[in-house]
Amino acid sequence: KHPILLSRSYHVTLFDFERSRRALAQFNPRVLYVSYPFGGYDNKAIKAANDAGFHLAVTTVKGKVKPGDNPFLLKRLYILRTDSLETMSRLISNQPQG
């Protein structure tokens, strides 16, 4: 009920992010993005993501990214498997719902 990342120190979080980057680098050497585990983040997690070499991070906050948003606090769109292609198209193209 409480994301584990929030209970860890900056140094442990940095170590985890760096280890994750190394593990993923075997599949893609340019690992630039991270999603906060279980959506949990705080100021130390944001700093650790940046210090680990990531260029942006995705939260679980629902919404659209706008110019000027913090690249380590990006929102996301939620598209369900039951959503139609038309619904998905409207969401990503900024067309009004309804």
Image (cartoon, helix red, strand yellow):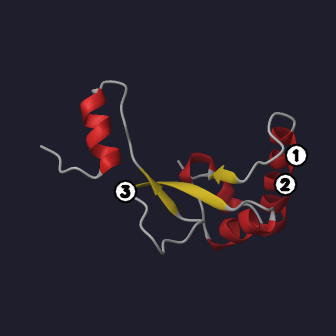
Residue plotted at (56% across, 55% down): 58
- Residue 21 coordinates in the image, percent (x, y): 81, 48
Residue closer to the observer: 60 or 89:
89
Q: Is residue 68 left or right of residue 52?
A: left
Is residue 65 placed above or below 24 in the rendered structure? below
Q: Which mark is residue 22?
A: 1
Let me know if residue 10 appears in the view.
yes
- Residue at image coords 68%, 61%: 7
Horizontal arrangement in the rendering, residue 10 relative to residue 70 (left or right): right
Residue 45: assigned label = none
Residue 32 horizontal/vertical position (percent): 72, 53
The amino acid sitting under disc 2 is: Glu
2 vs 50, left or right, is: left
Residue at 41% x, 67% y: name it: 66
Query: Up-down: is 22 above or below 41?
Result: above
Give the spatial CA distance, label 1 vs label 2. 6 Å
- Secondary-structure class at tag 2: helix
Q: Earlier in the sequence, mark 1 or mark 3?
A: 1
Q: Mark 2 = which residue?
A: 18
Give the SS element for disc 3.
loop
The residue under label 3 is 63
Disc 1, SS: helix
Total count of labels: 3
Pointer 3 or 2: first along the chain = 2
